[in-house]
Image (spheres, rainbow, N blue to C red):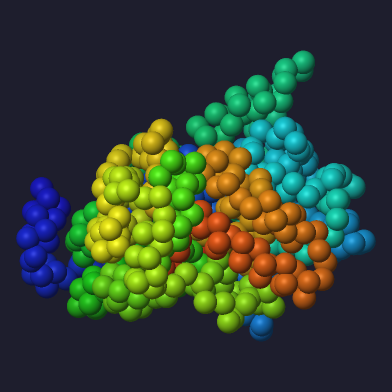
Amino acid sequence: MMKTMIAAALACGALYASLPASPALAQQSNLTVAVNDLPRTLDPGETPGNVDVRVYYNIFDTLIRRDFAHPAADGGAKLVPGLAESWAWTSPTTFDVKLRDGVTCHDGTPFDADDVMTTFSSERLWGADSYYPEGRVYFGMLKDVQKLDGRTVRFVTAAPDLALEHRLSSYISFVICDSAWNASRKEGVGHKVWMAEAARALRAKPIGTGPYRFVDYTRNDRLRLQAFDKYFEGKPAAEMVTFRSVPEVSARVAGLIAGDFDIIVDLPPDQWKNIAKYPDLKLMPAALENTHVVTFNMNDPVLADKKLRHAMSLAIDRKALVDSLWDGKTYTPNGHQLESFGPLYIKDRPGYTFDLEKAKQLVKESSYKGQEIVYRLVPSVYLYGPEAAQSMQEMWRAIGVNVRLDFVDSSKDQQKPGQQLTPWSNTFRIPDPTGSLLVLWGPESDMQKGQKLYKANPEFNELARELYTSNDQAERRRIFARALDLFEDDMPMTMLYNPAPAYATKKIINWMPYSHYYMDLRPTNFSFAK
């Protein structure tokens, strides 16, 4: 009842100062995290979305881990051991990984090379008919994966691959446990049939090697994890972690102040001052390697006109969005790249620009005749998504384009027949174009092969393949620049900005957020103050 009263007061514009200071707490052992949305599933091969990875990052481990706290000297990413204790290229196309000893899966079985072989099998992940299609986007350049002994695995690539180590630290590379997955294997049954059963079992009870094991999941309410005391980096600090679904920002803030929550996510800048009023709370801004975008369905009869797509992109005043929504605390990348790309970053690219007069002229030159265009969005998924949509609706109206907003309940609803405009976020999953632009928009991506919203210039797809195989960084930079030119000319989407939300926590929480949506609750990154 109290939460309802607080939320109602906030909705009416009441000040958070009217709430009492959150109560002082004794040493605690459980953690409650209020999130905007719970995972769709906990299958790391199926759903690598923002709301998914922040939870299952704590259930599963990768062979190699990115050290977000200590970037490389050139601005690129630094890699450190995960389930692998060491790794090396033994030839231009063979990559050997030495596994840690003493690691245990949540079901009690010892971790070894068989778990890696199962995770990276061609039938599951990277073969022409793999169960998980997105696996081919990440690892389609693999030629073989070999077990050299119980603690050593060799990855064989069809050509040199300068980004393999980074991909082994990222999405799709979370290691599953062999015994649980292969319990569904049936002799004489096609791999996609028995793997469908294995995937259902994994979604119901995911088993990994991470610091927390799965307990239960009540859809639209909560998801609980329990500390895995045999974790190889030591016992986790929290005995139980509960992720609580709290879609409204005001309710998350009120719950933190009242002491119901320990961490809240996606706090917009207009709420930061409210947190500062409470001495036992702290604000933790996070600069995300993620960009909010608007996708154009190139198969739609209206949006098939490239001049119209370019006009709608040019009509967006991104600085106005950043200033009004994010209080000027973020930016729009200059193309599908970040400075963390290191030597591949192209500093002088203009990226997606604002030019109202050119936008108006392109509308006149296009085939557009005033038809209604529908922008479908799920209001709770992206922070400031509805507000950005309403602002862009006015910007598009200023160039004579009629856009109607359609608020729907799920991403599946967004993708129903008639899809035209939709919001999306593009995470730079590794600091390399093969793990960002090409994973999301390349020739094997869902945008080209699954949803088929992007009809790419054939040269773009050819350059994409070259980026995977070239072992000369200067040449890769040249290829990347040309690929960006073609991609921006195709205009299957336009960039808005990198979101700049903050986390807010109780001061007794010792934890560092990352530039990805991972919520790392390992002993090395999370503890309670004593």
* Relative to 346, residue 79 above or below: above
Q: Position of residue 439 (x, y in %)?
A: 62, 53
Q: Residue at x 66, y 48 (%)?
A: 443
Residue lying furthest top: 188
Residue 119 left/right relative to 451: right
Residue 350 left/right relative to 321: right
Q: Nearer the viewer, residue 273 or 406?
A: 406
Q: Quadrant of residue 431?
A: bottom right
Q: Nearer the viewer, residue 417 or 104?
A: 417
Q: Position of residue 230 (x, y in %)?
A: 61, 51
Q: Position of residue 332 (x, y in %)?
A: 44, 72
Instruction: Work out which quarter of the rendered image holds the C terminus and state it.
Output: bottom left
Q: Residue at x 41, y 33 (%)?
A: 417
Q: From where the camera sits, is residue 64 visible?
A: no
Q: Quadrant of residue 466?
A: bottom right
Residue lying furthest bottom: 73
Q: Position of residue 277 (x, y in %)?
A: 20, 78
Q: Residue at x 50, y 32 (%)?
A: 204
Q: From where the camera sits, is residue 409 visible?
A: yes
Residue lying furthest front: 365
Q: Nearer the viewer, residue 89 or 227?
A: 89
Q: Residue at x 70, y 29 (%)?
A: 182
Residue 13 left/right relative to 199: left
**How many dots with numbers?**
0
Residue 248 left/right relative to 228: left
Q: Nearer the viewer, residue 358 or 69?
A: 358
